[in-house]
Amino acid sequence: MTPPAPKILVFDSGLGGLTVFTEVAKLRPHAALLYCADDAGFPYGPLSETALVARVMEVMEKLVAELAPDLVVIACNTASTRALPPLRARWPQLPFVGTVPAIKPAAEHSHSRLVSVLATPGTVARDYTRALIASFADDCAVTLVGSTRLAPLAEDFMRGAAVSEAEIAREIAPCFVTRDEARTDVVVLACTHYPLLLDFFRRLAPWPVEWIDPAPAIARQADRLLVERFGPDREATAPAPRAIFTSGARPEPALAAALTRMGFSPD
Ligand code: DGL
């Protein structure tokens, strides 16, 4: 008899975590995949650390009780850079995989040593982010750019609404820095919503840079932990992925179509 497929919950404040979900689904096509968007709590970016932790713990309490996941991916930098320790303390047996700014690979890839980190205001303000810079990029000039607008714009885009290219260009502009003859050559996408806008970023950037999306690395980490506990992905009859919205709202037609394309069951 084949063992049951592990149940993986991917969690974010909104739709950004779908960028991580897609990578997890590629590595674990036979897992029972669940996605939860805390759209009733969106956006997390401007929340105080106390409010953020309280919100994440409250939502996770219900999700763990109802869904009993085998592994949780916190597909949100804003939440991971603050809420991972309390989550792990509350559920010591449940593996949590976090998403934190990809500063180490950025420093490894940069030739100019001018690196920018594009994130929510919460993530750029975190001690955790500063500690990553001190550990992995102390010989780089790192520009932290906190945006309140890009995550809501990514949500609008996924819901089929028109988004302003001028506004996107304005939001990414501070990432592009020149110093003497050098200019920024690597930008870390330190919010899971931002890869959803990557085509805009590439088109609107004042010069080409490498954009670092950590989603494939996060999926590999989740897969490693699953291999340790359940073995490699193997044929199993798992239900189609399910998307849960904490607001209880039904996705708009454009979003419903995008979710169907990603393999989610239509209800
Ligand atoms: N997707 C989240 C992140 O990676 C943040 C979006 C929000 O502000 O809620 O940081």
Image (spheres, grey):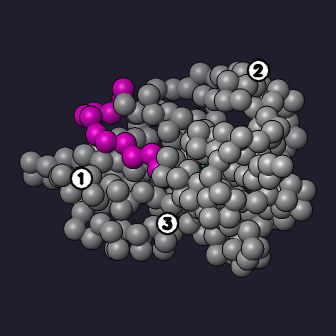
Task: Give, as a three-letter code, the residue at label 1.
Answer: Ser
Q: Nearer the viewer, mark 3 or mark 1?
A: 1
Q: Which mark is residue 110?
A: 1
- Furthest toward the right, the residue is 66
Q: Which mark is residue 125?
A: 3
Q: CA distance from mark 3 to mark 1?
A: 23 Å
Quarter of the view holding residue 130? bottom left
Task: Give, as a three-letter code, the residue at label 2.
Answer: Pro
Between 154 and 26, the one nearer to me in the picture: 26
User: Which residue does the image show at 44% across and 28% down from the upper left?
Assistant: 199
Residue 101 position in % (x across, y down) = 46, 58
Q: Is residue 124 above or below residue 163?
A: below
Task: Give, as a three-letter code, the residue at label 3.
Answer: Ala
Using a 10 Å C-alpha cutoff, classify the residue at mark 3 as few (fewer than 14 neighbours), some (14 to 19) or many (20 or more).
Answer: some
Left or right: where does residue 96 sit relative to residue 120? Answer: right
- Taking the image as drawn, is residue 182 in sight? yes
Question: Which residue lies under the disc numbered 2?
Answer: 253
Q: Is residue 155 magenta?
A: no
User: Which residue does the image show at 34% across and 74% down from the upper left?
Assistant: 134
Residue 187 position in % (x across, y down) = 35, 47
Between 267 and 16, the one nearer to me in the picture: 267
Q: Which residues are magenta?
A: 203-214
Using a 10 Å C-alpha cutoff, classify the residue at mark 1 as few (fewer than 14 neighbours), some (14 to 19) or many (20 or more).
Answer: some
Q: Nearer the viewer, mark 2 or mark 3?
A: 2
Left or right: where does residue 175 sit relative to residue 234? Answer: left
Using a 10 Å C-alpha cutoff, classify the residue at mark 2 as few (fewer than 14 neighbours), some (14 to 19) or many (20 or more).
Answer: few
* Secondary structure at numbered mark 3: helix
